[in-house]
Image (cartoon, grey):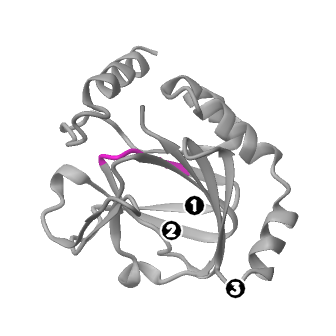
Amino acid sequence: MNWSRNRIKRSQENYPGNWIPKAASYIMILDTLATADHYANLHPSFARAFAYLRQANWTQLLSAVQASEHPSTRHSIDGDRMYVSIDCLEGRGREGARLEAHRRYIDIQFTIDGDEEIGWKSLADCALTSIAYDQAKDVMFFRDRPDSWLSLPAGRFAIFFPDDAHAPLAGRGTLKKAIVKIAVL
C-alpha cells in the first residue's frame, strides 16, 4: 500500500495547479471489476465509479445510445465531477487509433461488449502534437505511436491518468464501452 500513498501525495503535488506530468508519477491500471476495490483509495470518487460500473443497467444504457442520433450518450453521476459516456462505436484497429490525453479528467474505460484494444504511451514521451489541447473538450491528440497495447475484452477496465496518453478504439468490430470521467483533484 505504500505505492498508493505515494501516488496520492504526488497527485496532490501535481494537480490541479501543475498538470505537467513527472516521469513515473502515475501508472496506468488494467484490471477487472472483481478486484477494482484495490484501487478505491487512489481517488475519493473511484469507489463510487466502480459501484456505478457494477450496478449499471447496460441493456437500458445501450438502448439509449442506439435510440440516439449519436454513437455516444453522456450520463451524470456527480455533475461535472463525474460522469459516464456510453459509446457504441466501430473499432479502428491499431493503425486508426490516435493517442489522446486529458488534463482535467481521469478516464476509467470499461468494455461492456466487444474486444477493445487501447494503446498507451507516457505523456512525457509524446512529442508530436497533432491537435493542441482543447480546454472545452479536455483533450489533445498526438501523432506519436503507442509504446504498448492493452487488451480489454468485455468485463475489463483500464484507468488512464492525465499523464497517460492512450489510443482507444484500436479493437475491431463493434465496441460497446463505458468511459467514466472523474475530475482530477
The answer to whether residue 78 is left or right of residue 92 is right
Q: Secondary structure at mark 1?
A: strand
Given the image, on which type of amino acid does mark 3 rest?
Glu
Given the image, on which type of amino acid does mark 1 rest?
Leu
Labels 3, 2: front one: 3
Where residue 140 sits: x, y (%)?
Answer: 30, 65
Residue at which label 2 appears: 117
* Within-10-Å neighbours for mark 2: few <14, some 14–19, many 20+: many
Where residue 173 sits: x, y (%)?
Answer: 62, 84
Residue at which label 3 appears: 69
Residue at which label 1 appears: 152
What's the distance in space between the residues labelled 3 and 1, CA to CA?
A: 26 Å
Labels 3, 1: front one: 3
Say above or below: 8 vs 128.
above
Which residue is drawn at the image coordinates 62% and 71% (left, top)? 115
Q: Which residues are magenta?
A: 158-163
Q: Secondary structure at mark 3?
A: loop
Q: Are marks 3 and 2 in contact (CB under 8 Å)?
A: no
Q: Secondary structure at mark 2?
A: strand
Look at the image and tell me in which quarter the C terminus lies: top left
Q: Please tell me which of labels 3 and 1 falls first in the chain.
A: 3
Where residue 91 sits: x, y (%)?
Answer: 54, 81
Q: Quadrant of residue 172?
A: bottom right
Q: Please tell me which of labels 3 and 2 falls first in the chain.
A: 3
